[in-house]
Image: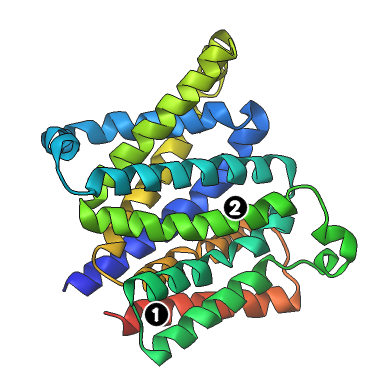
Amino acid sequence: MFIEIGVIFALGALIGWGFGDFLIQRSVRKLGDWEPLLIITGFGAVVLTPFVYGDIASLIFKSDYSFFVLLGASIAIFLTAIIDFEALRIGKIAVVEPVYAFEVPISALLAFVLLNESIALFHAALVCALIIGIFLVSLKSHHLSKKAWIEKGVALAVIAAVLQGTSNFMIGIAARETNFLVINWVMNLFIALVCAFYIITNKRTQKFVHHVKQNKKLLITVSIFDNFAWVCYAAAVTLIPIAIAVGISESYIALAALLGIFFNKEKLMRHQKFGLLLALLGAVALAITYT
């Protein structure tokens, strides 16, 4: 029963990130990195406060290392978000997306080495199929040229993938040490305070308020999707192995491809169709066989 709920949460993260990343790119290209990040995390901190209010005092005065785990995870995800947002802002999403597939093995490797968390060979094969599928979906013909791989944003995407894989693992640890709402609240509050400090010290407050008024609908929508995804992911890793949760949720790239087909009338190349099918079948098979 708990495993089934964990898979459902992972699928929720898939949906949230599928829509969220598309909206994040639109946000950062219009407003830069810091302003959307402040709105997304500030929104999450405010919405989650009533649900974690009773845990805040005990968290601060706890004698164990839970607070430091939460702080470490928050710092990791902050660095990831800034680099990820910048990669999406300056780079082409079609160029940087393939790199993000490698978050999955990084998270799985950390869970295996540090937590001794292993999965069945069959499920490991499905995770590998997902990674290959996600990579193929994102791979356009121009990626085969040397120029594509040295385009702006690719180097940042590589760094973001390593940090995101590490962050996925650390959030899993923090969620298990506390709970999935507390880690999201601490993470959001920490990042929101850092972003607010940056905007205020750089005298961008008036511009920030003006941008929020102009783009209220976009910012609220992306905040809902992104926070929904992170809450779902943190809940999933408390119930199922990190490798499974990351494998299912990272299939959002395949979802994004489907959205492009239906809403933007995009056409896929043969290898992309194969990758899409492989990723979707892998995600479905992983979700079904792990329940």
Mark identifier at residue 93: none
Q: Amino acid at mark 2?
A: Ala
Q: Against 132, is 122 above or below?
A: below
Q: Nearer the viewer, residue 237 or 232?
A: 237
- Farthest residue in the bottom direction? 121
Q: Mark 1 falls on what kind of element? A: helix
Q: Position of residue 108 (x, y in %)?
A: 44, 72
Q: Against 187, is 105 above or below?
A: below
Tell how many labels.
2
Q: Disc 2 marks which residue?
A: 160
- Where, quadrant-wise, is the N terminus in this rendering? bottom left
- How many residues crowd around disc 2 within 10 Å: few (fewer than 14), some, or many (20 or more)? many
Q: Nearer the viewer, residue 88 or 108?
A: 108
Residue at (65, 29) in percent of width and height: 30
Q: Amino acid at mark 1?
A: Leu
Q: How is the image coloured?
A: rainbow
- Farthest residue in the front direction? 63
Q: Disc 1 marks which residue?
A: 286
Q: What's the CA distance linking mark 2 and mark 1?
A: 25 Å
Query: Which numbered disc flags the more N-terminal residue, 2 or 1?
Result: 2
Horizontally, residue 174 falls left or right of residue 224, namely left
Q: Position of residue 178 (x, y in %)?
A: 20, 51
Horizontally, residue 89 falls left or right of residue 196, namely right
Q: Is residue 261 visible?
A: no
